[in-house]
Image (cartoon, helix red, strand yellow):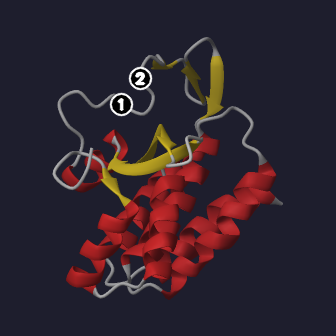
Amino acid sequence: MGKRGSAIRISDVKAELKSLHSLNQQQVHSNLTYLISQGWIEEKSIEKEVRTRGGTTVPSVTKYYQISASGIDKIEGPGEFTMPKFHGIKIEATGQNIITLGDGNQVNAQFGELGSKLVDLREAVIASNRPEEDKMAIVADIETIQLQLAKPDPNKNILAAAWASLQAAATFGGCIDLVHQVAGLIGPLIS
């Protein structure tokens, strides 16, 4: 723990980011909150008891932040020991129109084209020159839709909400045609 360890206090994070990137306290907190919510940073708390001069004991909590395995995979790419997203789920084709997942869950193969276009859109978004936080928001919505398509009966409300946010990718250079293609394929699923 501490500045030379694998976990660091928020005061050290603020000082480093201020000197390196001129970020203010509010920017550090909002970015840290985002990284924690995405699972890329973990918060660790160490509780101590501090004895005052008067003899009373006061609880003290120090929070440390460290990069998670997901955060390392995001920065460096998956490692040798990274589990695949659907580890332990058996996927096999059982016919022309059905794919069986795991214990008999079936997915209609008609989602295959939409899934392929979402992969293309994700790559185009990542290759765009937009700010990283804009890219991450769009990629998260793409992954939400892809996860729903892995289910035999995708949740229309989740698909519609993710699609509403995903349409912002049309403003990214090189993505407008892909957004229109995805719109044509996802439309029947959310109507």
- Up-down relation of residue 35 to residue 62 (above or below): below
- Up-down relation of residue 57 to residue 4 (above or below): above
- Up-down relation of residue 132 to residue 3 (above or below): below
Name the image quarter holding the N terminus: top left
Name the image quarter holding the C terminus: bottom right
* Residue 26, position as x, y percentages in the image: 50, 80
Is disc 2 placed on a helix, strand or loop?
loop
**Residue 87, numbered label:** 2
Please report contact status of discs 1 and 2: CB closer than 8 Å, yes or no: yes
Residue 57 visible? The answer is yes
* Residue 136, position as x, y percentages in the image: 44, 67
How many numbered marks, from 0 up? 2
Is disc 1 placed on a helix, strand or loop?
loop
Which amino acid type corresponds to the residue marked 1 in the rendered image?
Pro
Q: Nearer the viewer, residue 96 or 124?
A: 124
- Up-down relation of residue 129 to residue 162 (above or below): below
For image coordinates 45% across by 80% down, the residue present is 25
Q: Which residue is mark 1?
A: 84
Which amino acid type corresponds to the residue marked 2 in the rendered image?
His
